[in-house]
Image (spheres, rainbow, N blue to C red):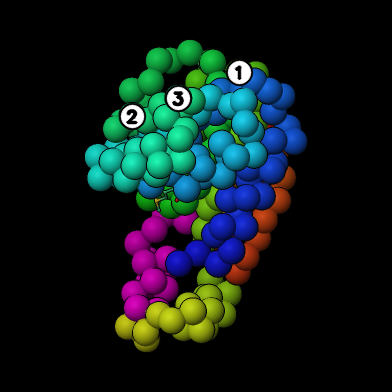
Amino acid sequence: MVPGYLLAQDLAAAVLAAAVPPPSTILIAGCGTGSEILAIAKALPDARITGVDPSPGMIAAARRRIDDAGLSGRVRLETATVDALDDRPDHDACMISLVLQFIADDGDKSAFLSGIRRRLRPDAKLVLIDPAAEQGLAPAYGAWLAANGLDAEGVLAVLNRTAHQWHCVSPERLAALLYQSGFGPPETFFTALAYRGVVANAC
Ligand SMILES: C[S@@+](CC[C@H](N)C(=O)[O-])C[C@H]1O[C@@H](n2cnc3c(N)ncnc32)[C@H](O)[C@@H]1O
């Protein structure tokens, strides 16, 4: 459970709607079951959207939701990583929601971001929702999880995963990774406990 998840998706879609003129082509890296595709398709009715995810199960679930929403005509889904897409700068924006924490900061994060940058036009927008590395708010996050129905064991598992298994980065490190990968300084549009949403321009 991510505090403010639906609000974060809606705000990200609003950020894109305000910044990207229609008709636009939007890349979703790690689209999971398609939640951000649905939010973006609603906010940008002329957008064509490509969602990629390496998990066949996630793509199958996303496809069902996209079909049910009547969006299959303007949404393309691929069981793949971004690297499998044509290496051409033909997207106006990219959204990465809750994916970067699964990628190690040993060169892989910047390779992932650089691969996305190569598929964006100059001045395109990158919208990112990411858990932060800072642990000061972990007790509050635990209390929020418990208040939202997770049992004690579940709370411990989530806090342990966040602190020790994910590859979370500080805001400064995220800004440095974005800079190395060809993006300008990130601007924050959302924070909730240790989650944040930022938007950056492709340089
Ligand atoms: C927590 S889910 C988030 C899904 C969706 N973006 C959302 O916000 O609801 C993380 C997703 O990232 C995908 N993923 C993991 N590594 C990836 C990579 N290198 N490239 C693209 N997607 C990746 C996983 O398969 C999973 O579907």
Q: Residue shown at 68%/23% (left/top)? A: 22
- Front residue of 113 and 45: 45
Q: Callout 2: 10 Å neighbours few (<14), some, many (20+)?
A: some
| Residue, disc 1 | 121
Secondary element at tag 3? loop
The quarter of the displayed image where residue 53 is located: top left
Question: Does residue 140 sit above or below 32 in this rendering?
Answer: below
Residue 61's disc is none
Q: Residue shown at 45%/67% (left/top)? A: 1
The quarter of the displayed image where residue 112 is located: top left
| Residue, disc 3 | 73
Tag 2: amino acid: Glu
Question: Does residue 173 sit above or below 117 in this rendering?
Answer: below
Mark earlier in primary sequence (3, 1): 3
Instruction: Determine the CA span between mark 2 and mark 3.
Output: 14 Å
Q: Residue shown at 46%/41% (left/top)? A: 69
| Residue, disc 2 | 78
Image marks 3 and 1: residues in contact by CB distance under 8 Å? no
Q: Is residue 153 visible?
A: yes
Image marks 2 and 3: residues in contact by CB distance under 8 Å? no
Q: Quadrant of ligand 1?
A: top left
Left or right, residue 188 beside residue 131: right
- Front residue of 180 and 184: 184
Secondary structure mostly taken by the magenta-highlighted segment of the chain = helix
Specify start and end residues of the magenta stretch as a single range.
154-168
Secondary element at tag 1? strand
Of circles 3 and 1, the one toward us is: 3
Tag 1: amino acid: Arg
